[in-house]
Amino acid sequence: MKRHANLAFFVPHLGCPYQCVFCDQKSISGQQKAPDPSEVESTCERYLPEEGTGTEIAFFGGSFTAIDRGLMTSLLEAAHKFVHKGRASGIRVSTRPDYIDDEVLDILRQYSVTSIELGAQSMDDKVLRKNGRGHDSNSVVRASGLIKEKGFSLGLQMMVGMYGSEDPGKEAKYTAEHLAILEPDTVRIYPTIVVEGTALAELYRRGQYRPLDLDSAVNITASLIRFFRNEGINVIRTGLHYEESLIESMIAGPYHPAFGELCESMIFREKIEEALKGSTETVVYCEPRLLSQVTGQKKSNIRYFADKGINVRVIPDKDVKGISINTILQ
């Protein structure tokens, strides 16, 4: 799988005309204000190597094309210099689906933007309304079509366990299936976290919202990862980045600093279980780099099978790509 790398800048909440119930980007990004062009230029100068890399310069925050047009183009101009020099492969931006049109896409193309991520979050219109998103699923479909038509790489972001989702697993599957139809190149999956200072925090305190527990969030997300991979879609992120401000402001929800690792471990557990076919013993050979994922955090997968009376041995093998499961017939 191709490794994805970003040199990221956060543009928190600027330009966004809505306040989603779950959103407090200052806590999530750990940043109080947008970078200025000189900061973008100095950071790129410092961290991008002189020779070309596969790294994209990324402007995250979810509403990049909705910010003041002058600020947007000045940030792009500062980043564009490093793409022109061959020190970055392109520019990635994240934005709202209702702030995409032909005009803005033409501007983004002029400044070497290659990838555009849309914060879809859900394809269930009822859930979108309850979360105050300010757009519907048709906006995601329309914007995705324009982005692909113009030749940009399309990324889509979704959340699991959102407010108003009566059956989180079913709603997540529905969203994933409808996002896959749009043929994105990449997907990010985030569990819903309750952050202080948000409307969701008040809903939680009033007992009107119950976040997913960690095990449920991992199970749902692992199933989504498997689905997207089967569709040939690259999942480039699961779970929120660690930020001290996020930890300080979080009051509930399935946050874990190694959330993605937990999901990968669950996927390997499911693969082993599918291969057992009634056997009570198996040997799993794996790439050495995957050892912790196959055995699970603190060997949770080994304990899971042991509790069922199944002996699973995991052996790292540099000649194996991925995993090789050898079930021992009884």
Image (cartoon, rainbow, N blue to C red):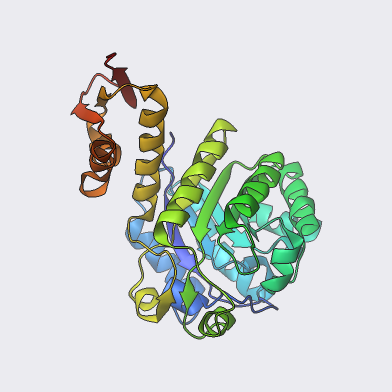
Residue 164, horizontal then vertical, whole percent: 65, 68
Work out whether residue 232 or residue 9 is closer to the camera in this orientation and state it. 232
Q: Is residue 109 left or right of residue 83?
A: right
Residue 78 seen in render:
yes
Work out whether residue 86 or residue 310 is closer to the camera in this orientation and state it. 310
Residue 63, horizontal then vertical, whole percent: 63, 69
Q: Is residue 75 left or right of residue 165?
A: left
Q: Is residue 133 above or below residue 267?
A: below
Quarter holding the N terminus is top left
Quarter holding the C terminus is top left
Q: Place residue 153 in its image quadrant.
A: top right
Q: How many marks?
A: 0
Give the residue drawn at x 28%, y 21%.
Answer: 320
Give the residue drawn at x 61%, y 69%.
Answer: 163
Residue 196, horizontal then vertical, whole percent: 47, 83
Residue 112 seen in render:
no
Work out whether residue 188 or residue 122 is closer to the camera in this orientation and state it. 122
Q: Place residue 230 in its image quadrant.
A: top right
Q: Is residue 64 above or below residue 306?
A: below
Q: Is residue 299 above or below residue 252?
A: above
Residue 91, horizontal then vertical, whole percent: 54, 54
